[in-house]
């Protein structure tokens, strides 16, 4: 298994290599399961990418009707809108979402991407281009792809 990958379980119908998901935690029903530690070994609120679906047996699950199967996941790269002055390929930044209450702004989700938290150390992998819209607070933004760095 490659470095940075984790083995976990996911619903068989959801297990497709290349798909991404945000781990939301477990259900109360999971407390009864003998496999709960394998399903719950991810960090709540982080975005993951399924790298490989192992062709092993399916396991019964109280939540997923077709059971769960073994997958290898990595933390996914995140696309975010950041201040243009900080947008340099291969640079390391500390993610600071803007103090913005413009929830109806077309850029709000890009400025506050799911899977990142304030203070996360990240490396910018690619500058995608100008943000697809104007910031209601007048900030100049670039859309970037970045990876959260291990602590």
Image (spheres, rainbow, N blue to C red):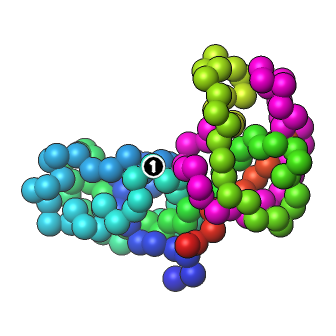
x 55%, y 66%: residue? 74
Q: Quadrant of residue 143?
A: top right
Q: Nearer the viewer, residue 71 or 29?
A: 29
Q: Quadrant of residue 94?
A: bottom right
Up-down relation of residue 59 to residue 85 (above or below):
below
Residue furthest to the left in view is: 32
x 57%, y 49%: residue? 118
Numbered range of the magenta stretch: 112-141
Q: Quadrant of residue 15?
A: bottom left
x 76%, y 65%: residue? 92
Up-down relation of residue 102 to residue 94 (above or below):
above
Residue furthest to the front in view is: 99
Q: Regarding mark 1 in the picture, which secondary structure is present there?
A: loop
Residue 131 located within the stretch drawn in magenta: yes
Up-down relation of residue 93 to residue 140 (above or below):
below
Please say whether residue 94 is visible from this viewpoint: yes
Q: Nearer the viewer, residue 30 or 92?
A: 92
Q: Main secondary structure of the magenta part?
A: loop
x 56%, y 43%: residue? 114
Residue 31 located within the stretch drawn in magenta: no
In the rendered image, the quadrant that contains the C terminus is bottom right
Q: Nearer the viewer, residue 29 or 19?
A: 29
Please say whether residue 133 is visible from this viewpoint: no
Residue 77 in picture, x, y percent from top left? 66, 57
Question: Is disc 1 surrounded by few (<14), some (14 to 19) or many (20+) residues within 10 Å?
Answer: some
Residue 73 in picture, x, y percent from top left? 50, 65
Would you name the residue on which mark 1 appears? 45
């Amino acid at each position: 298994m490659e470095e940075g990958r984790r083995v976990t379980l996911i619903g068989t119908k959801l297990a497709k290599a290349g798909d991404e998901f945000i781990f939301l935690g477990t259900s109360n029903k999971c407390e009864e399961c003998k496999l709960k530690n394998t399903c719950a070994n991810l960090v709540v609120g982080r975005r993951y990418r399924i790298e490989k679906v192992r062709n092993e047996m399916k396991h019964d699950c109280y939540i997923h009707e077709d059971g769960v199967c073994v997958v290898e996941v990595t933390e996914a790269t995140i696309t975010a809108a950041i201040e243009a002055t900080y947008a340099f390929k291969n640079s390391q930044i500390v993610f600071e979402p803007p103090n913005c209450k413009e929830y109806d702004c077309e850029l709000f989700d890009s400025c506050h991407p799911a899977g990142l938290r304030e203070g996360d150390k990240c490396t910018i992998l690619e500058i995608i281009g100008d943000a697809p819209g104007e910031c209601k607070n007048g900030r100049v933004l670039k859309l970037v792809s970045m990876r959260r760095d291990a602590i």
